[in-house]
Image (spheres, rainbow, N blue to C red):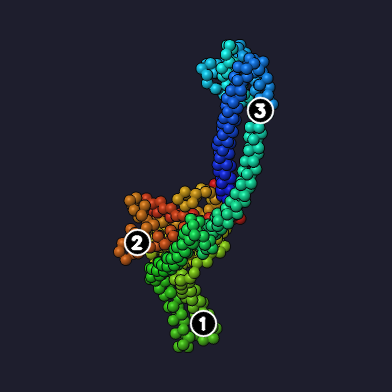
Amino acid sequence: MRLARKFTLALLGLIVVVLALHAWLWLRREVSLYENDMQRDQHLLGRAVAVLLRDAHEEAGVPGVERQLAASRSLAGHIGLRLLLGPEAEARLTDYGLAEYVRGGVTATYTDHETDPGGLHTFVPLDLPGEQLAVLEVSESLDEERAFIRGTILHMLVITAILAAGASILAAILGVNMIGRPIRELVDQARRIGAGEVGARSHVRHRDEVGDLAREMNLMGERLQAAGDELARETAARIEALQQLRHADRLATVGTMASGIAHELGTPLNVVAARAKMIETGVLVGDEARSSAQIVREQTERITAIIRQLLDFSRRSEPEKRRIELGSVLRQATVLMSPMAEKRRAEIVLDLGTQPLEAEADPGQLQQVFANLILNGMQAMPKGGTVHLSVAAERRARPEEYGGGSGCFARLQVRDQGSGIPAEALPRIFDPFFTTKGIGEGTGLGLSVSFGIVREHAGWMTVESEVGIGTVFTVFLPLLEDACAGASS
């Protein structure tokens, strides 16, 4: 509506200026015509009276002139007639700057606008024999002219006010209907689109620039909606591909763990087979048979637990973040990787601290992260060694490339005693399909997948390595507020 008001005020100002200029020009013209008429009438009257005065002077001299002048005054009405002789005439003409003109026999006129009410004075030279200088002054007050000017100004003010009021009302109505309401509807549409409601449409149907803008806004909304739908489809496809990639990485890890799992299952299966054969052949009877059956059950439960862990790890599931204790995730990852560690003569050491640390996370995804990191550590130690896992809370600043700010984070470290990573390879260590391992030992997806999972949990990963000494992968995850008590700075 502000635009409509501006439009109305601009139109009103233009009307006032145009009317004022027109009134000034018209009034100036009328005043000029009015004064020209007065001057012409005075010239005619002055010449006529001058002829009568010359005739009266020829008949009776100056007394005759005065008598004739008195008679002429009575006929002239409001127009003043005055005879100026000698020095008086000289002084009067000199005051008005007309002496030279009148001495030359020219009828001259002077308009006095300085005094109030002012007047128009015409000086007609008289040819009176025996007189040094004789002049007939014809004068008329400008009262009527000033009254005419005042009336004209009042008339123009009234006309201007009426026109301005009418124009203002018309401009306001047109401004509201043609500009104000359509613009307000377009603003509302833009706000709704900005708030994400890209399906918002305008119903402005004007055949002007505002209508063109409304149609373009509707077209923009349609394009945004189409782009949003396409982006949603692409995002869904990307998420699906990412989930498939992560599942493939899980299966690759399961394949790597297969030999260790087979070794882990071999011992209990041998025990089960031996005990079952002894019971079958009757070697064991009574209490000994019952004891062997119990051993078979226990070993079967152990086998079942190992297989369940493997299936749980390899099964594809939708991400589900919930409140979890991070130490339990590390313990589960350690249990899962223990068979492989035993086969590779590696030891997994856990340092969970004294304070449970809780975060909002998906336990399955984090388990995949640390299983990958433990596997990397063991693969970096072909002759065996120790993979050390630790978790602690600390208050620190978040790197700018990960959003900046500060808060309370869990610092989860996986440290190995392996061969280390060359310095030139560190900048690419989290790139997809990049690996420093030998052929058949890795796909180059594990660290990339782990990095993406940590980023989705609002965290970040760092790596420090020294060739011949070992590597440390550090994962930072935001902790819940009530889990930050006692965190180090």
* Left or right of residue 453: residue 468: left
Amino acid at the residue labelled 2 = Phe
Q: Is there any visible trace of residue 177 in the rendered image?
A: yes
Please state which amino acid type lies under the numbered disc 1: Ala
Looking at the image, which residue sits at the far front? 59
Judge left or right: residue 257 versus residue 285.
Answer: left
Q: Name the residue nearer the viewer: 108 or 296.
A: 108
Q: Residue at x 58, y 32 (%)?
A: 37
Discs 1/2, front? 2
Q: For mark 1, does the 10 Å Cα neighbourhood hold few (<14), some (14 to 19), or many (20 or more) residues?
A: some
Residue 486 is at least partly visible in this image: no
Give the mark, 1 or 2, whose residue is nearer the N terminus: 1
The residue drawn where x is 47% and y is 48% is 400
Q: Which residue is mark 1?
A: 293
**Secondary structure category for the residue under label 2:** loop
Instruction: State if disc 2 and disc 1 touch (CB < 8 Å).
Output: no
For disc 3, the marked residue is: 76
Which one is in front in this view, the residue at disc 2 or the one at disc 3? Answer: 3
Q: How many C-alpha atoms fall within 10 Å of the one at disc 3: few (<14), some, or many (≥20)? A: some
Residue 266 drawn above or below residue 103: below
As drawn, the label of residue 311 is none
The x, y position of residue 249, in whole percent, is 40, 66
Label number found at residue 433: 2
Q: Is residue 378 above or below residue 282?
A: above
The secondary element bearing badge 1 is classed as helix
